[in-house]
Image (spheres, coloured by chain):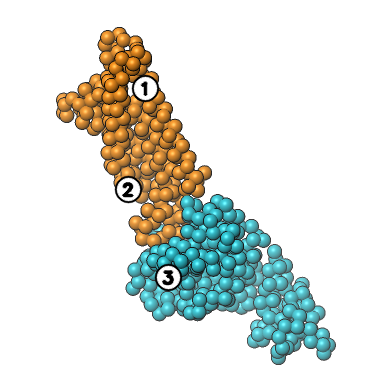
Amino acid sequence: MSYLVTHPGDVALRLAQHVELTLSALAIALLIATPLGVLAARNGRVKQLVLAVFGTIYTLPSLAVLALLVPILGLGFGTALVALVAYAQMMLVRSIAVAFEGVPQPLRDAALGLGMTPLQAFWRVELPQAFPIVLGGIRIATVSLIAIANLAAWIGAGGLGVLLFAGIERQDNQKIVLGAVLSALLALGVNFALEALERSARRRAGLA
Amino acid sequence: MTDGGAPLRIDRLVVRYAGAENAAVDEVSLDVPAGSLVVLLGPSGCGKSTLLRSINRLVTAQSGSVHIDGRDVRDVPPTELRRGIGYVIQAGGLFPHLTVARNIAIVPELLRWDGTRIAARVDELLALVQLDPANYRNRFPRELSGGEGQRVGVARAIAAEPRLLLMDEPFGAVDAIVRLALQDETVRIQRALGTTILFVTHDVDEALRIADRIVVMAHGQVVQYDTPLRVLAQPATPYVEALLDTHDAVRRLALLRVSDAMRPHSGEPGGARIAPGQTLREALSEFLRGADTLAVIDGDRPLGTLAFDDVRRALARAAG
């Protein structure tokens, strides 16, 4: 841990890069996955197609995906971002589709029967009901992204992986432990926070 | 509400689901007078719910027409149409993430009533369905019993004073005793507001208990459309006879006395008379001959009156 004492700036930078990469990937991934997931919940053929494509991407080893992207996109943050976004799709689209499929039919019927437009029914009834389950998907995707983001260092995108790889290269156990502990703490902290959020969202949706 | 109910006319309505061999609703014509409570009765799959849902256009009819208040429902945008029609479904369909007050306020909010008017209306409706506003308005649906949830469902449906109310097996999920109370409530509210109600059920006793007129349906068609009295006493087909178990009902009436069902000293004795010891089956014959109420007279001592409503209430009591 003495590296933390001697180089606090570098450790903070790596942590910030790791968070930045994870959050950017999550944000972009959600922008893509939300409409796809909602569409998949309404249309069985869309669901089949989308899950087949993202399912295939998801099964590819992450290291291999990064390696394959380098000749196309070069090294750096952008390439890592693309890989992480592609990775998160499967987890997010599937949980969003399941969440919206799970809204009970009588609630949709009531919403439309009372005279809501389809858009009003979506915002006022379907989204509040689906949200806690979507949060569960976001939690799992985020924790996975934090883990995979360690590999980003290998293609020059920074993050806590830099400490890990440098530690392995120079047989510096302190750095390895520091990098591992920090990314584990980050994942655990995020998991804990999102779990708490999920519980309160469930209560508010009347699901708990 | 003072403007009462809307008349409803359904003319040769056909609804066919994609891929289905037979039409779900097959050339149904129905005239529902303003302010009446008409029950659609039949086994599941007979098309009664589909018929109901084609009135507020949750289901699209292939041919025929539905007129509410003389206006073709196809001439009104569906959202506007539905905001003007009350809709109650089984188990209430209350939104679990909204309080009782917010659930009831849905349609007034869609109609952009102002906040104070909505709040006042919510309290008025809770009182109408016999739930204490102070105690109930901020509860969530999970904090309600089945019967309370159903009452809130009714309050929500009539919030914006619709002149037509559609109820789709509304009390199917509550226990028998609560169901009886809710049926009485429905009739009471209907009498008070004059709303036209179309009520779907597969429960024969429920239909006999609340209906002004009963529509007996089978295979997407109307088999009989008549008052409970005539459906019971003169079933149009063997199917109606079997569905309502009319033999059994008339037999049960033969076991009950006029004195079990009459109202003591309410109103002036009318034309036709009956003795307290006679059976309700004999009373039924008098009603079929055209009497509205019978004077119950013991020798020459008037005891009270008997109307068909009293007969069917006694029948429901005996059944339940």
Mark drawn on residue A39: 2
Q: Marks 3 and 1, how far apart in space?
A: 59 Å
Placement of A94 over or under B181, stated as above or below: above
- Location of residue A160 by image quarter: top left
Cβ atoms under marks 2 and 1 closer than 8 Å: no
> Which quadrant of the figure contains the C terminus of chain B?
bottom right
Question: Which chain is disc 1 placed on?
Answer: A
Foreground tag (2 vs 1): 1
Residue at 58% over, 54% down = B144
Can you tell which mark lies on residue B84?
3
| Mark number displayed over residue A182 | 1
Q: Earlier in the sequence, mark 2 or mark 1?
A: 2
SS assignment at label 1: helix
A39 or A131: nearer the eye? A131
Q: Of the residues shown, which amino acid type is indicated by label 3? A: Gly
Marks 3 & 2 on one chain: no
Relative to residue B56, is residue B281 depicted above or below?
below
Question: Which residue in the rendered view is the most extreme toward the right?
Answer: B299
Q: Secondary structure at mark 3?
A: loop
Q: At 27% from the left edge and 30% from the top edge, which residue is drawn?
A: A21
Which tag is nearer the camera, tag 3 or tag 1? Answer: 1
Q: Position of residue B209 (x, y in %)?
A: 63, 70
Figure colour of chain B? cyan
Q: Nearer the viewer, residue B246 or A159?
A: A159
